[in-house]
Amino acid sequence: MANEADSAVRFVNRMLEVTAALSEVVFIAVLDNVSKDETLDLLHKLVVKEDRLRVVWAPENRCLVDAYERGYREALATGFEWILEIDAGFSHQPEDLSLFFGPMLEGYDCIFGSRFCQGGRISEVSPKRYLISRGGSILTNLLLGTQLSDMTCGYQMFQRAALQHVLDRGIQSRMHFFQTEMKVYCRHMNFTEVPIHYHAPSNRVTGAAVTGAFARLFGLFRQRLAGSL
């Protein structure tokens, strides 16, 4: 989370509501120096009365991917078998989470939320952000032989062994493309997509992030041609 003071408490509470039927749940919120508002203070107040919430302060993070990797490691350390990644701030809808449970019970290694599969939708997003997401998915599938309709979404659930495999491979991207890189590493696993509603994301995808994404994509393409991917 970063600068989510307006919605952080409401988001945590809603996520805990939609997972109430599960036997045990932990919500892990990772914050670092990017967050300048009252989000951290609000969550520290909430954790006093909500023992399912864990707040991780990680000032050592140097980039977006560091924050996510810290979250993955914290989640793996819980020993839980299912690990969900979701963006805070309601760009991802907590209500869509129920769609992930059935496939996980069927034994899939990973479930990827998709804005572009049948039933998925995207609203209140800039044309630039839509083009990056849609075009990036098409280009990645073309170059790397992947088969997901949405290669850039960050609403996803893993069996712990699948997530550990991804981390063991090593995420090289330092910006938003890491979501795509993770899916590439899962391409030989047992996976599926479920439709989600993606609503009003932030516009934090910079030109440098797009340039970095292309560089990493073509790096993976060269690895594929060399047979080392």
Image (tube, grey):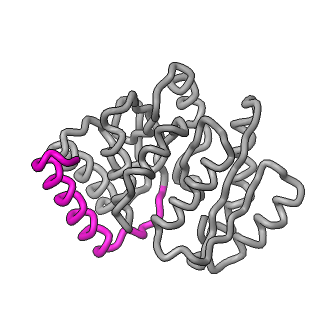
Q: Is residue 13 positioned above or below 34 on the image?
A: above
Residue pictured at 24% horizontal, 62% vertical: 216
User: x, y (%) of residue 11?
Assistant: 68, 53
Magenta stretch, overall SS? helix
Q: Is residue 62 left or right of residue 138?
A: right
Residue pictured at 48% horizontal, 44% vertical: 163
**Considering the image in quadrants, where does the N terminus appear?**
bottom right
Residue bounds of the magenta highlight: 200-229
User: x, y (%) of residue 201?
Assistant: 47, 59
Q: Is residue 24 left or right of residue 157?
A: right
Which of 109 and 179 lies nearest the eye of the viewer? 109
On whether residue 217 falls in the magenta region, the answer is yes
Which of 77 and 178 lies nearest the eye of the viewer? 77
- Figure label count: 0
On whether residue 204 falls in the magenta region, the answer is yes
Residue 143, can we see it? Answer: no
Q: Is residue 135 positioned above or below 174 on the image?
A: above
Which of 185 and 84 lies nearest the eye of the viewer? 185
Q: Is residue 144 left or right of residue 77?
A: left
- Judged from this view, the residue extending furthest toward the left is 225
User: x, y (%) of residue 169?
Assistant: 37, 51
User: x, y (%) of residue 22?
Assistant: 72, 31
Residue pictured at 66% horizontal, 59% vertical: 29
Q: Is residue 211 positioned above or below 189 on the image?
A: below
Residue pictured at 44% horizontal, 32% vertical: 194
Residue 200, can we see it? Answer: yes
Q: Is residue 69 positioned above or below 147 on the image?
A: below
